[in-house]
Image (spheres, grey):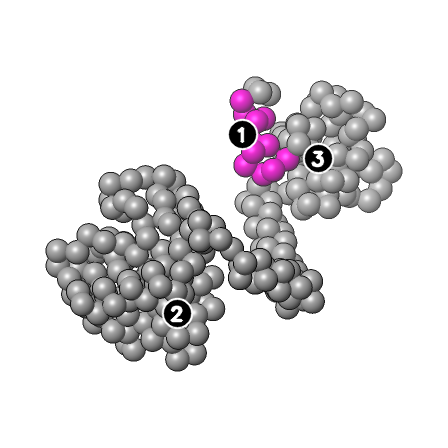
Amino acid sequence: MKDEYIDEVRHAFNLNLYEAKIWIALLTKGSGTAGQLSELAGVPRSRTYDTLESLERRGFVRLRVGKPAMYEAIPPSEVVENVKLKIEKDLEQRRKKIERIKSSATIKSLENLYKSSISSLKPADVISAIRGRDNIYSKLASMISNAKDSVYIVTTSTGLLKKLNALGRHIEKAKKKGVSIYIAAPATEDVKPIVSKMKGIKFKNLSDLNSRFVVVDGEHAFMMLAHDEEIHPDHDIALWMRSPMVARTMQEMFHKL
């Protein structure tokens, strides 16, 4: 077996070296004993048994009861489904764990610590730089979901499509709570059909607009520092200003646009 092929299988299915070698050997042979597979795969016999147990537990092989014990290969297409189900199960368990943590006393205590520290920040400490579009959108998603009064979004036509895709469900969540949503962007041909479906959102068509900023609750202001079509998403950067004065000034600017 070529090392490149083994590495490809390892990375595709998240296997260690011995697991990949044993599974490939079993697929080649169809079935075999631990000793036969050890010899065929070039895996130490002392490690073959625990490797086969791991593969069986993860849904890559089946144990055929008898003497001697025989192992048989599971079709790769079936293995893909087994791996997919395991990933989905693991993700669901992690999601539930995060949800439990979110409502725990520990988080409430940490939030209180954060709020007390924020109230004592110096003026120079109220501005943070957030790098990377995924990180920017993640922070915006949190802020919009927790908004209590208003959300103002000013962006480019391309930026509007990206923001609605990344933040759409968070905007809907805020709307259902009675939060006022204001959006300003150029209504280009690809944007118009989407704008026509935006119910409960106050939209301004500004054809020559190149600004990118978001204001939440008149307290938090996000200013993106580059045009979204002129910078790689990983290099995008935003200034997050926790300043009611700056945020409300930007809100007033929106209404004067």
Sequence-first tag of 3 and 1: 1
State the CA–CA distance, disc 1 to disc 2: 50 Å
Say if residue 170 shows up in the picture: no
Marks 2, 3: nearer the viewer:
2
Magenta highlight: main SS: helix
Image side of residue 26 versus residue 216, left or right? right
Residue position for label 3: 31
Residue 213 tag number:
none
Sequence-first tag of 1 and 2: 1
Residue position for label 2: 217
State the CA–CA distance, disc 2 to disc 3: 65 Å
- Front in this rendered view, residue 210 or 245: 245
The picture quadrant where one finds residue 222 is bottom left
Marks 3, 1: nearer the viewer:
1
- Identity of the residue drawn at 12% across and 59% down: 207
The kind of secondary structure element at disc 1 is: helix
The amino acid marked with disc number 1 is Glu
- Pointer 3 local density, CA inside 10 Å: few below 14, some 14–19, many at least 20: many
Q: Which residues are magenta?
A: 4-15
